[in-house]
Amino acid sequence: EFFPKYSNYLNALVASGVLKVDGIDEVFDKILGEFGKSLYDGRVKPLYVSFDTNCFINRISYQLERFAKEKRAKLGAFVVAEGIKRELFKEKPGKYREEELRVVKRIDGRFEELLNQPKVEERIKKIGKAEYDRFRSSVRFEEIPSGVGDNEIAESLGDFPRERNCDVWLMTFDKTMYEVSVGFGVYPILLEFPYRRERLKLKTDWDCVCDLIYTTAVIFGFVNISGITVYGIWRGKNPDDWNKERVKLKLNKDAKQLRIDLEVLGKIKEIIKF
């Protein structure tokens, strides 16, 4: 498992915010509208919004925050079943071994940085894990006990509004979770990946471009940008590196002008100090 699948390309584009989920702006508008309602506006019960595992992997939570900031709107409360956390945080055994890398290293020596690092699917989960931790610390966020699996998670989210006299909306990419959650009294919102076969020309902002570099570097292992290799994984990458979404940069031999620019900037910095 060295090369990502087609769906993983979409993960990189969607998680960065470069490619939007179909109808996501309308969904975010609806959520922010309900968050902003009071008893006088027709909302009888407080609203809690929840996410499934793939929403964290595709960083829908982060995109909702960005959207709210752009609209200058306040976010409400969020609730997530612990089963989601377990799915994200449980690591499967199996990392790249020396004998697995032997052939690909002959093609490109940079593959040696993958040694003892997680394979593609686990790396994608780590994007979701980092987002889960970030989001939990930045909003009103409550974890509730649950087992692992669609039924267990949906049942836990269904019990929550009866105990708290509130409404729960669940954002999910999973059609099975969508159907199951309805039976437990949860209001589901089904998200769908944009399906494109033609070549795309997309307009986006600088933050999304930076995020795209990060997500593609993690999913592919490394990417090359104008003479710079951006490593998403490397030998010795530790949990703090994952949580803080760090990358490793290495200047290639053909990055002569960039090396000169960096030397000049370094000298300017030294002069400013004095």
Image (cartoon, rainbow, N blue to C red):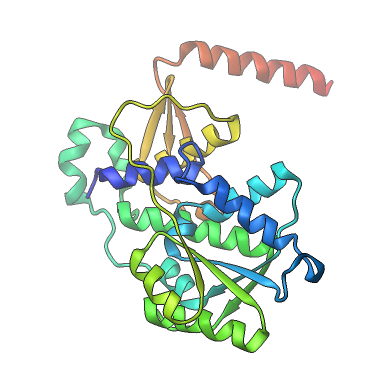
- Based on the displayed image, in which of its 4 quarters is residue 151 positioned? bottom left
x then y, percent, for residue 81: 52, 76
Seen from the viewer's position, the closer of residues 270 and 179 is: 179
In the rendered image, the residue lying farthest to the bottom is: 163
Residue 60 position (above or below residue 270)? below
Residue 57 position (above or below residue 50)? above
- Labels in figure, total: 0
x then y, percent, for residue 51: 51, 65
**Left or right, 26 with reference to 183:** right
Seen from the viewer's position, the closer of residues 16 and 104 is: 16
**Left or right, 134 with reference to 229:** right
Q: Which residue is drawn at 46% across and 53% down?
A: 127
Residue 40 position (above or below residue 1)? below
Residue 12 position (above or below residue 123)? above
**Left or right, 150 with reference to 185:** left
Q: Which residue is drawn at 24% across and 45% down?
A: 2
**Left or right, 221 with reference to 158:** left
- Based on the displayed image, in which of its 4 quarters is residue 270 positioned? top right
x then y, percent, for residue 183: 42, 80
Seen from the viewer's position, the closer of residues 270 and 91 is: 91
Can residue 110 be seen in this snapshot? yes
Q: Which residue is drawn at 69% across and 16% down?
A: 267
Can residue 149 be seen in this snapshot? no
Seen from the viewer's position, the closer of residues 66 and 235 is: 66
> Which quadrant does the C terminus fall into?
top right
Q: Residue at x 45, y 44 (%)?
A: 14
x then y, percent, for residue 201: 42, 24
